[in-house]
Image (cartoon, grey):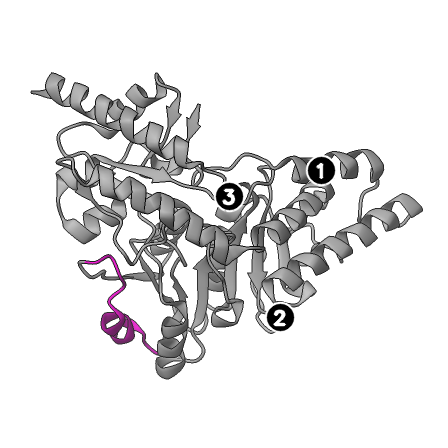
Amino acid sequence: MIYLDYSATTPVLDSVLDSYVRTTKEYIGNANSIHNLGVKSKELMLKATKQIASCLGVKRNEIIYTSGASESNSTAIKGVAFKYANRGKHVITTKLEHKSVLETFEYLSTIGFEVSYCPLNKDGMIDLKELENLIRDDTILISVCAVNSEVGYKAPLKTIRQIINKKNQKTIFHSDMTQALGKIKVNLSDVDLASFSSHKIYAPKGIGILYKRESLDIEPLIYGLTENCPYRGGTPALPLIVSMAKAIRLSTENLDSNYEKVSELNNILRSELEKLPVHINSNNLCIPHMFNLSLIKIKSETFVRALEKEEVYISTTTACSSLNASTVLNEVYKDKDISTTSIRISISPFTKVEEINSFIEIFKRTYNSLLLKEN
């Protein structure tokens, strides 16, 4: 098997799974309970949260646990919109965003909010001048992902923060950092809110984090609040919290060397696949962990299914909208063939050179075979 779909989800590391199993067996108490077992669980939860906060360079009380990045995104966007609607109902985002962000903004547009989409340049980058022009006195929220989940475009969050501070310091800045954590350095001082998910960093599915700046108040998405869960009601998922804490620590170690390794693998992939009559969408402004291209004459789903028969696994667009045209590619290129035939190959530091070489061979063979059938 050759697995190159790490941006959709990652396998769970053995050491992370061990933490999950051990916590499940040894800490059976509800962290919200006042008896000894509950206190024991609460203490472990606080320890794990402190570790996460330390890795991210934030305060412990700025960490909110959720079921995943989609919930974190919804909580951040709705939480700000509902809390600060008295200031204004203008919000800004981009077509770079994950489906969970775009659809939440679409929902806001149905209940009286005005949504502006900042245009993208031909290289896939945000038009910063246009962003500055869009910000108004009644703009309460801007949401821009740190790394686009399909092509890998990296946003200049620090520059965006500077623009916000220049135009309207009351505007709140949220970033979906799901595809950034563990791949590049993240600086949460650039944003007010940030979303993360465990299953992108070799931890179990089912838990995410919303970073919320301490001085910022938002409306909760899920009620039933407790001392341990002041912004998101429910029983703390302690085994998931502990395993995510370990995964965050491991994923933020050796970032530079891991980035260099993935870059080398990406270069091998690019040097061979660009020889084919395909359209390479990922450019040098993208992180190397994603390599996106459009097949033009072959349906992306057909190609992914053909590779699956060879036990090779990649994605079309993103896992959450795999059968639709790519929103971001449609915005950048305005070309139906490019936006409807894209595939995403995602690489990990655990990917071997031999796997990349085998993948290239299988890719070329499959591509040429399907191209003959199309013709």
Magenta-tinted stretch: 123-137
Q: Distance from label 3 to label 2 (Cα)?
A: 26 Å
Direction bottom: furthest residue? 166
Q: Are marks 3 and 1 in contact (CB under 8 Å)?
A: no
- Structural crowding at the residue carrying mark 2, measured as other residues with C-alpha within 10 Å and reported as few (<14), some (14–19) or many (≥20): some
Q: Are marks 2 and 1 in contact (CB under 8 Å)?
A: no
Q: Place residue 348 in its image quadrant.
A: top left
- Structural crowding at the residue carrying mark 1, measured as other residues with C-alpha within 10 Å and reported as few (<14), some (14–19) or many (≥20): many
Question: Residue, x 77% and y 39% (percent of image)?
Answer: 23
Residue 311: x percent and y percent?
39, 20
Q: Which mark is residue 20?
A: 1
In the foreground, 80 or 149: 149
Q: Which mark is residue 113?
A: none
Q: Are marks 3 and 2 in contact (CB under 8 Å)?
A: no
In the rendered view, would you say 16 is above or below 137? above
Q: Which residue is mark 3?
A: 200
Judged from the image, the secondary structure of the residue bearing numbered disc 2 is loop
Q: Distance from label 3 to label 1 (Cα)?
A: 16 Å
The answer to whether 89 appears left or right of 193 in the picture is: left
Question: Residue, x 34% and y 27% (percent of image)?
Answer: 358
Question: Residue, x 56% and y 41% (percent of image)?
Answer: 202
Q: Which residue is mark 2?
A: 214
At label 1, the amino acid type is Tyr
Residue 132: x percent and y percent?
28, 75
Q: Earlier in the sequence, mark 3 or mark 2?
A: 3
The answer to whether 21 appears left or right of 299 in the picture is: right
Judged from the image, the secondary structure of the residue bearing numbered disc 3 is helix
Q: Earlier in the sequence, mark 2 or mark 1?
A: 1
At label 3, the amino acid type is Lys
Q: Earlier in the sequence, mark 3 or mark 1?
A: 1
At label 2, the amino acid type is Glu
